[in-house]
Amino acid sequence: MYHFNENNIVAGYIKELLHNFNLPTCEVFVPNFTVVYPNTNYIYNNSIIKTHQDVNISTYDDLTLYMYDFVQPYIYNKPIPNITKVLKLNSILYDTYTHEFLGNYLRFIRDFEGIDLMMLYNCFSNRLVDNLIYNAFNAEDDQYKIYAVPIKLDRKYIIGIDSDAEVEIACGLFNNNLQITSVDTGDSSITNSLYALTHKKFNQTQFNNPFEFEVSSINMANNVLIKDYENSLKLFIKLPAQNKSSISVVEVSGSVNQFKQGVDGNITNIALLPSYKGELPSKLSLFKMNDSISYPFADRLLEYLFGQAITPNEQIGENIERVQKQLLSPTQYYRNGVRLRHVGYYGVWDNEIRNTVYKALSIKKNKSVVNTEKIVNIPLNQSADFNDDGVVDMDDAYYLLYHIEFGAEDYPLLNEFPPTVVQGDLNGDGVVDEDDVLYLQNYLSAPSYTELNAVKTAASSFIYDITGYIDKDVESLITVVEE
C-alpha cells in the first residue's frame, strides 16, 4: 500500500499523468445521475453547454435544446481556456493537492468514459485543519482533531472509522486552508443550511462497518449559490485527539447496500466496469485493514492508471468480441479447425475463448505435417454423401459434425463405405472426429473439387488452411476468422 507524502516512482507517474491531462472543471452530464443546475456549464455530446436560468434542479434522462446554450466544442484532453486545468508540479511528493486532483480526474473518467474507479480511491486527503471555528467544530480545542475531506454535492459516501468515543461530522466551506463564512458569500443561509442538514453525531463507529453520508442540495436554502461554492465544500470529521484509527471515505455511485456487501467479501453486484457483470477477484482493500494508517487509494487503482487493466474503452475488448462472434460460426470451425461453443460475456477473455485459441495453436503445431500414406484413396464425391441426398456438399459436413457431437442415433451416416474403411473416417487416421469434418470442408473448398480425390486435397488445401493461416497471436487469429 502507498502512503501520503511519499516520493517514489508511483507518485511521480501519477503527478506526470495529471500534469499532462487537461481536466475539465465542469461536470459531464450523465443521464439519471448528474444533478443539473441552472446557469452552469456541463459537457454534453462532446460540447460545452451552459444551462438556462430557469432549469429546475434535478436529474434528467436527457437534455433538450430549450434547456441550454451551446458554448463551444469539447475535444478530449485538449486545453480550453477557463474550462480545463492541469496539475501544477509544486512538489515531488504525493501530497494532499495531488490526491484531491486525482479524485477529480477519476470522477471525470467515471462520467465521461463510464469507468467507475472511485471505489478504489479514498476521498480522505489527510487534510488536518487548525484554523476552523464552525459551531461545534473548534480547531483550537486540543481535545479533538478535525479533518477536512473534499466531497461533492448530491453524492453518497460510506465512511469507515474505529472509535469508541463520539464522532461528529458536518459540511462547511473551506478552501486554501481558510474557512469561508457568510461574510465571504454574502448570504448566511448557505453555511447555516449546510450545517443544519449535515451535522451528525455517532456514539461509536466501526471501520469495517462504515456508515453512510449524503449531502443533497435540492432541499437546501439558496442551493444555486451553494453550487457555485462546490469546489470549497468539505466534510469536517471531528475525532478525539488520541484516536489513531485509519480513515476511509469512499464515494459511491450505485447502491450503498450493494457496495457495503463488498467490505467483507468480494466486489459483487457493483458495476465497476459496466460491461463486466462478473465478480472482481479482490476485496475492498480500503476497508480491509485498520493499521492506524489512512491510505490514499487501493493498490488495484494503479493497474488502471498504468494501463495494465482491460476496460471498455480499450480496443482489445472489441477485438475479443470479434473473435468470439466469428468462432461461434460453424463454417469458421470447418475452415480453421476451431470453433467456440459458448460465450459467457462478449468482450471478456474467459476460459472458453482462451481454450479455443490454444486449441487453434495446438492444431497448427500438431497438424503441420500430414501423413499422406494414411489417407484413404477413395473419391469423396462418391463416399461422403452422409445425408444421402445424392450430392456431396456442405450439408454433409454439417451432418458429419452433428453425427460426432450428438451421436449416430440422431444423425446416422446414411451412405456406404468400403468394408475395409471406418465409415466417416475421411483422413484415414482410424477414428471419426472433427478432423474429418475439416477434411471434407477443405475438399469442398478446393477448385474443381469434383475431380479431386482425398490424397490431392490433403496434399494441398488441408496443409494450406491449417499451417498457412493460424498464427500465434490474437491479432492473427482475428484475421483468420474474418477471412
Image: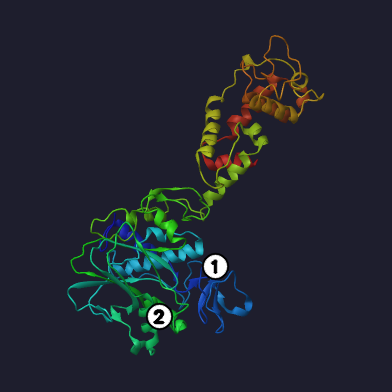
Q: Could you tell whether 364 is left or right of 404 in the image?
A: left
- Extreme residue toward the front, this view: 203
Q: Is residue 305 above or below residue 52?
A: above
For disc 1, the neighbor class at 10 Å (few under 14, some 14 to 19, many from 20) is: few
Residue 419, numbered label: none
Question: Is residue 155 shown to the viewer in this render?
Answer: yes
Identify the disc placed on residue 32: 1
Amino acid on which the number 2 mark rests in the picture: Tyr
- Mark 2 burial class by Cα count in 10 Å: few <14, some 14-19, many 20+: some
Expressed as whole percent of the image width and height from the top left, the position of residue 205 reads 29, 63
**Along the horizontal axis of the image, is 356 left or right of 461?**
left
Q: Is residue 391 above or below residue 212?
A: above
Which secondary structure lies at badge 1? Answer: loop
Where does the N terminus fall, quadrant-wise? Answer: bottom left
Q: Quadrant of residue 384?
A: top right
Indicate left or right for 71 with 251 as reference.
right
Residue 193 vs residue 175, the one in the foreground? 193
Name the residue rendered at 78%, 24% in the picture: 450
Q: Which residue is mark 2?
A: 229
Percent x, y of residue 77:
47, 67
- Does 443 appear above or below 201? above
Looking at the figure, which quarter contains the C terminus? Answer: top right
Considering the numbered disc 2 on the image, is that residue within a helix, a strand or a loop? loop
Q: Quadrant of residue 8?
A: bottom left
Where is residue 443? Give x, y as percent. 71, 26
Circle 1: residue type: Asn
Q: Nearer the viewer, mark 1 or mark 2?
A: 1
**Residues under labels 1 and 2: Cα distance?**
23 Å
Which residue ends up furthest to the top in the rendered image?
420
What x and y, as percent, mark residue 442?
Answer: 68, 28
**Residue under the image location 62 percent in, 23 percent down:** 433
